[in-house]
Amino acid sequence: MTPSNASRLAELDTLRALFVRAVRASFAYKPALLLSMLSAGFAYLIPMLVWRHIYAARQQAQPISAQALFPYLLIAGCLNFAFAMNVEARIGQRIRLGLIATDLLRPVDFQLAQLAQALSDGLFNLLLVLPILALAFAFWGPAALPHGGAALAAFALSVLLSFVILFAVSFIFVQASFVTYSGYGVFVARNALQQTFSGLSAPLVLFPPGLRAVSEWLPFRHTIHTPAAIYLGWLSGAAVLRALAEQALWAGGLLMLGRYLLKRALLRFEIQGG
Amino acid sequence: MPITLKAEALAKTYKRKLRKPGLGAAFRGLFSSEEEAVHAVSELSFALERGERVGLIGENGAGKSTTLKMLTGILVPTSGKLEVLGLDPFRQRRQLAAQIGVVFGQRPQLLWDIPVQETLSLLRTMYRIPKSVFDVTYAQAVERLELGPLLPVAVRKLSLGQRMRCDLAASLLHAPKIAFLDEPTIGLDVSVKEQVREYIRDMQARFETTLLLTTHDLKDITETCDRLLLLDRGKLLFDGSMKEFERRFATKRRIVLELERPVSDAVSKELAKEMLELGAELQECRGHRAVVVYERDGAAPLLTQRLLSRLPVSDIVLEKADIDSMVAGIYRRSAGHAESKVA
Amino acid sequence: MERYKNVYFSAFKASLQAKLEYRVDMVVGIVTSMLMQGAALSFLLIVLRNTPTLGGWSGREVVFLFGMTAASLGGSEILFNQIWMLPQYIVAGDLDRLLTYPVRSLLFFLDTRPELHAFGNLLTGVVYIVGSLWTLHVPWYVWLGIPIWLACGTLIYTSALVVFGCLSFRFVGPFAQQLLIPLNLLQASRYPLSVYPGWLRKMLFFLIPYGTFHYLPGRVLFGKTAALWGLALAPAAALVLVFAAQAAWNVGLRQYDSTGS
């Protein structure tokens, strides 16, 4: 066995041990796990119930059918759940404790390392969400599956890019921790913006014109609406490629912006420490 | 003196979940959970009179804090009878709280993010402390514990030692009838410990407070208490005065000698044999120092005479065994007995 | 005979002053909560674009519900927010100190950590309520009822939080997820309950009676029903829930193990 293989095996072993420990930890507080899933489910349920009522009441013609809307809402909900990252908590804490200065001296790029960690969190969340998607198949049958293999591949790429975009936004927002102690408040603010403009509670086509216009200018719609639209086949051919390209541009641009802001922040603010 | 606190066959048992290692066990743990009973305190009986100063000692896990929490109404006893100032601590918690003062050394928590000064005045409102009392206790606290510079500082910003002092002051601000102090000197510098002990002694004398103090630092006990309760694994091993404690458990004494010059190996070997014959032990004989340990039985004069004749002594000190080694001796002894295991 | 101030009020005031020193946090808190309310309102705007009325309620009437919900939430956040810390306190055994004070432990615990989000929610709520009622031309005496219903809403929500929070005495762990249930149900009550299926409506009337402090009064005020009893149910519901909360707390304290040594 070559040295590099040996070290890779050792890494895998460590990862496995960490994974087991994480699972054990979450099972240790079994009521918490159950409740947080229940609560998340409920939060997504409410808008769905409202829409259900509206469609049942049929008081006016709708731009899209119920058959189109409800799978969208389900996918949107699953994506939102999967995207719950701890970025603000982790980085925010390091800023408040003054550890960020040493982090930046390490040979590993800080932002990318945090991104990697966020991605692994997301992977774990996706695993939790899969059973719900399975339920979706049970309810809606083939309509719940993506339209073809190409759509599935594009969807996967889109989800990855959405992740990066959300991470990059969080990375920018979390820098408010240089001036405020309330890391949680900043997180909630970012979350509120995301909820409003990402298309979580309704696809963009249902938005009033003013709101829609603002959404077009912000990156948030690319975190839920775009991947969901690809999944459901609302975009096809060149439109998919263009959407992916837009996502990639946002992702890259926001990451750059985050790095730039961090550098400036470190120059301006005193690093607080114990 | 009237009885202020009476405990009869007091007991506290916890149920604790058993956690087994491994992923499989974690899954199984989702559906079932085994429990074991932990007897933190069992069959505890004692009584305190007004104005008594009592120390409660024991190793970690002996049940000191659990006992204290039952006495103050934080925990409800599993069984037994308990009466403090004529009240049931758990059921009449608020009534009792107005008349007792409590310090938790391991977790000194004054209220919140507010300055010390404000906390103290808030406590004044809370305990409805009359001006005549507050003026005295507040002044005493500020002066003796040097709280002056700390008053405008937010509690959050204080060091451990500073917070402990403030916590102590806060607990005695209303001149309580009983003061329960759980490790009040833990983590403090030696000089601060002295200050704190003096303050406690003084307040206790001034207001005739009944004092129940738990500590790991036995000097706290020797300097502020007359009576000692020793807990081991939830049971009371000893309840009596400090003198009785020394009489029963202080068996060893030491003679420490300073030598003008070192002595040869041959001489010290000879001396060691001689000491053994006299029932003592030459613990150390190196360089300019020699130590002899013996059982307390009046052998001191003879031993001293021999040592002075055999060694070039420049100084001599006779020591009692310190309380730490006495307590350690007790634990060794009790561990030696066949103890009933935790059920 | 000396007179003493009310200790709960003094403690609250002191805590609030301490919090207000963090100016930036206060601003963040207010902005954040207003963004959250904005997010909810944006969904309402989306919904109203796609339907003229919602469950028989006009847009403005729904805004009234939004406002009452927001203001009650704000009221609880400013007065009783420390409930969210209960699980952590239990795990760390930090309730000990509280229990050595001669105060009502539940009330004192609740009111000593105001959450500055509250100002944003209160402000938004008041704006929504005043705006909607003004444009709906309600009679003047309605305004007298608003503070009462809001107080009931705050009490019902807080009591529900306490009851759920007390589960932490039994299932010890540093998580407060169970508190999301009363919160989510409160947020759900922003929309007219007539929109929801039967099982949810029942939950919002009988499990946690949120329906009593804004939906039922709203039905009377906006002329959807002639039955006046809808106006008076909230205080009764609040009373029941406050009792339940205190009872849950008492039971919880018996189970409180406190990490002793």
Image (cartoon, grey):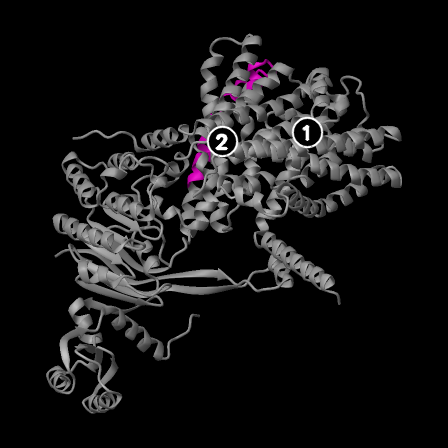
Residue C208 appears in the picture as rendered:
no
Tag 2, which secondary structure? Answer: loop
Indicate the position of residue C164 as horizontal and vertical percent values. Answer: 51, 41
| Residue at x 55% of width, y 12% of height | C131
Q: Position of residue A58 (x, y in %)?
A: 77, 20
Q: Which residue is mark 1?
A: A47
The type of residue carrying mark 1 is Pro
Residue C161 position (above or below residue B283): above
**Marks 2 and 1, how far apart in space?**
35 Å
C225 magenta-colored: yes
Amino acid type for the residue under numbered disc 2: Val
Observer-nearest of C28 and A51: C28
Q: Which quadrant would residue A242 be assigned to in this image?
A: top right
Q: Are marks 2 and 1 on the same chain?
A: yes
Q: Give the residue number, with chain letter if any, for mark 2.
A: A179
Q: Secondary structure of the magenta portion, mostly?
A: helix
- Which stretch is magenta? C218-246
Q: Chain of mark 2?
A: A
- Is disc 1 placed on a helix, strand or loop? helix
- Residue depth check, mark 2 versus mark 1: number of the one nearer the observer: 2
| Left or right, B207 with reference to A189 | left
